[in-house]
Image (tube, rainbow, N blue to C red):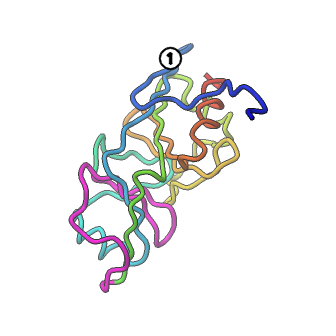
């Protein structure tokens, strides 16, 4: 038995909401991997020279790029599946498929920094090596690509963050 009528919905892939000089879109992630351990060895194995970006640092438009979560952890966004088995590698790193773990929103417009502040994120003056922070009360990975803010959150929180961002717009 349904105890209530659910009125909030997650933003569909590719869908956009625009309001008052701000735009929110759900971004498609072709492939994503959580990598832990020796990040230099792992990233050189998969895509030498891949940028590793922190909080609100500017990243490339498309993969591959790594979003730093912690000292020895990144979320690798790739434009294709890796030709590497998942699990522990003897070179000192582990790889897990994360395509279904995270969803990514893009936020653009003049009010993007105000909306980040509503979620509790202040734009730092100096770069922070980790993109992990609290946003709207949950853990998020927040980066930029040009004038666009990218917010990666756990898929389980997609409806909640959609609702939060929709109301903040």
Q: Is residue 155 magenta?
A: no
* Residue 127 on image: x %, y %: 50, 53
Q: Residue furthest bottom?
A: 90
Label 1: how many Cα within 10 Å (few below 14, some 14–19, many 20+) = some
Q: Which residues are magenta?
A: 64-91
Considering only vertical position in the picture, is 3 above or below 94?
A: above
**Mark 1 sits on what residue?**
18
- Please tell me which residue lies in front, 28 or 47: 28
Q: Quadrant location of the C terminus? A: top right
Q: Quadrant location of the N terminus? A: top right
Residue at image x 55%, y 15%? 19
Considering only vertical position in the picture, is 52 above or below 28?
A: below
Residue at image x 24%, y 61%? 82
- Please tell me which residue lies in front, 67 or 159: 159
Q: Quadrant of residue 91?
A: bottom left
Residue at image x 76%, y 29%? 4
Q: Residue furthest front?
A: 1
């Amino acid at each position: 038995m349904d105890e209530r009528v659910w009125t909030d919905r997650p933003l569909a892939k590719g869908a956009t909401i625009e309001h008052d000089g701000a735009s929110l879109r759900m971004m498609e992630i072709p492939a994503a991997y959580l990598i832990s351990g020796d990040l230099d060895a792992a990233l050189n194995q998969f895509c030498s020279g891949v940028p590793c970006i922190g909080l609100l640092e500017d990243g490339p438009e498309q993969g591959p790029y790594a979003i730093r979560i912690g000292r020895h952890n990144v979320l690798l966004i790739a434009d294709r599946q890796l030709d590497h088995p998942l699990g522990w590698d003897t070179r000192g790193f582990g790889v897990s498929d994360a395509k279904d773990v995270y969803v990514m929103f893009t936020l653009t417009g003049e009010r993007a920094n105000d909306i980040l502040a509503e979620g509790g994120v202040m734009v730092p003056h100096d770069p922070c090596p980790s993109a992990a922070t609290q946003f709207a009360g949950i853990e998020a990975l927040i980066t930029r690509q040009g004038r666009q803010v990218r917010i990666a959150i756990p898929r389980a929180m997609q409806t909640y963050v959609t609702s939060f961002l929709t109301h903040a717009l």
